[in-house]
Amino acid sequence: MLPKVQTPVKKIEDYREYISRKQYEEIKKKAERLKGLKVNMVNSTPRGGGVAEILKSLVPLMKGIGLKANWYTIPAREDFFKITKEMHNALQGKMYDFPFSARKRYIQHMARTATMMKDMEADVWVVHDPQPAGVIQYLPHFHPSVCRLHIDLSSPNQDVWEFVAGFLEMYDRVVVSSKEFVRPEVEKEAVVFPPAIDPLMSKNQPMDEKYCLEVAKSLGIDIKKPLVTQVSRFDPWKDPLGVVKAYKLAKKEIPNLQLAMAGLFLAQDDPEGLKVYKKVKAEVGNDPDAFLFSDPNVLGGLKVDTFVNALQVASDVVLQKSVKEGFGLTVTEAMWKGKAVIGGKAGGIKMQIKDGENGFVAATPEETAQKIVKLIRNPDMARRIGRRAKESVKKNFLMPRLLNDYLDLFEYLTAHHANNKRSNGSQEVMEMFSPYKK
Ligand code: UDP
């Protein structure tokens, strides 16, 4: 059996104020029909990064409505995660000469992992991202199954994509966050729905502004000076060097501007972070107005969620300068706090920010700097944009909506999978599901 991540139970009733009556009733109805459904979620890390963040809420909510939902992670191995990070980067478009030895090691680890899974059972399997996706080749009972891809697939390296697509096609459905990421090889299996954040998690709950400023102060930040922040793993796709450049340019106009970059080393499947961090650190030099956070130990007693929440609230402007982005939960989190976010022109961010309406989208450090200056000089505009940002998150990107999408998918799969004991072939389910199908 795979290592299991322990999760609590969350009640959908507690989310009433965040959902319409119609959505609430729909969820309750579907929950009744799916009661007792055994759902096994599989990913590669219990903490750090967006996938763990989503599962931390989604699995407890599924349990709360009566599903037997479980969350497992595949065994961690440094050499394997080095390869899967290269694959991840290549799938987001980086050049990579995918060597035979790496393909072999990936497959070997999948075969080993599958051995640990051969006695595990579920009514539906949901596997997140390419790291564990290859197990399907070794598990004939692995149906119905879903592969949920959280990455930006707008222009993948064809070599790695073809390797991965070879086993993605074995899944009954492949879920991506945006239509832009549907590739021809899995068009037949594709389903599109975006992720969401949990408004009840301490990271996203309203936090007293005074307290947030105190936290910022305790981290060395001068709360009388303007602050621009990016919360993101130190990863080239998040363009941390572009962030520093934009900050330096903006600082020419606003000399007391401060920068905070938070990318705590938490994820076990991300071995690249330290290298990128060192480059960013060198670029920042000994600027007393720039604060980099990478070591979780510097937080002392402060919880990661409180730290992120406080930092976002204490900021005048939040950046997410990604050049590729599957979705970008950090964008949603900051928008939910009523912040004006400047995002990169990348897949998932374009889906969340309507430029000039509920945030800004900027392609270059120069454009980002201009928008930082504009927002800091116009706090009324920042507030107005922030208000719209919060509204759009409430409407589209909160956890009950994601739960609802999964329930539709589960109903469809259980109704249409020939071997499934729950199969009822209902026409209603078929129609309900169709809007998600490409
Ligand atoms: N995060 C965090 N601490 C950090 C950096 C990031 O808790 O120092 C969280 C962040 O708040 C968000 C998630 O990690 O919930 C990152 O998700 P996102 O989709 O933005 O990016 P990913 O890391 O999955 O590419």
Image (cartoon, rainbow, N blue to C red):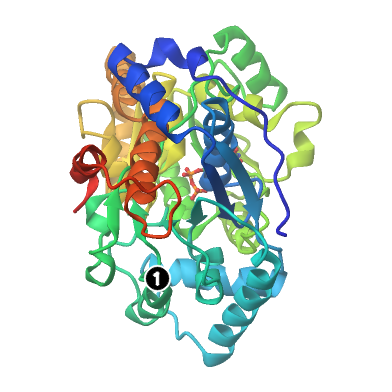
Q: Is residue 289 above or below residue 281?
A: above
> Is residue 280 found left or right of 162 in the rendered image?
right
Task: Examine the image and state in which quarter residue 307 appears.
Answer: top right
For image coordinates 46% across by 29% down, the residue present is: 333
* Count of numbered tags: 1
Q: Is residue 284 above or below residue 260?
A: below
Reading the image, the residue beneath label 1 is: 170
Three-letter code for the amino acid on which mark 1 is drawn: Met
For image coordinates 61% across by 55% down, the residue present is: 277
x, y (%) of residue 42? 58, 54
Q: Is residue 208 above or below residue 8?
A: above
Point out the image quarter for the N terminus: bottom right
Where does ligand 1 appear, by image quarter? top right
> Is residue 190 found left or right of 334 in the rendered image?
left
Is the residue marked by circle 1 packed among few (<14), some (14-19), or many (20+) residues within 10 Å?
many
| Viewer-closest of 367 and 44 | 44
Dot 1: element: loop
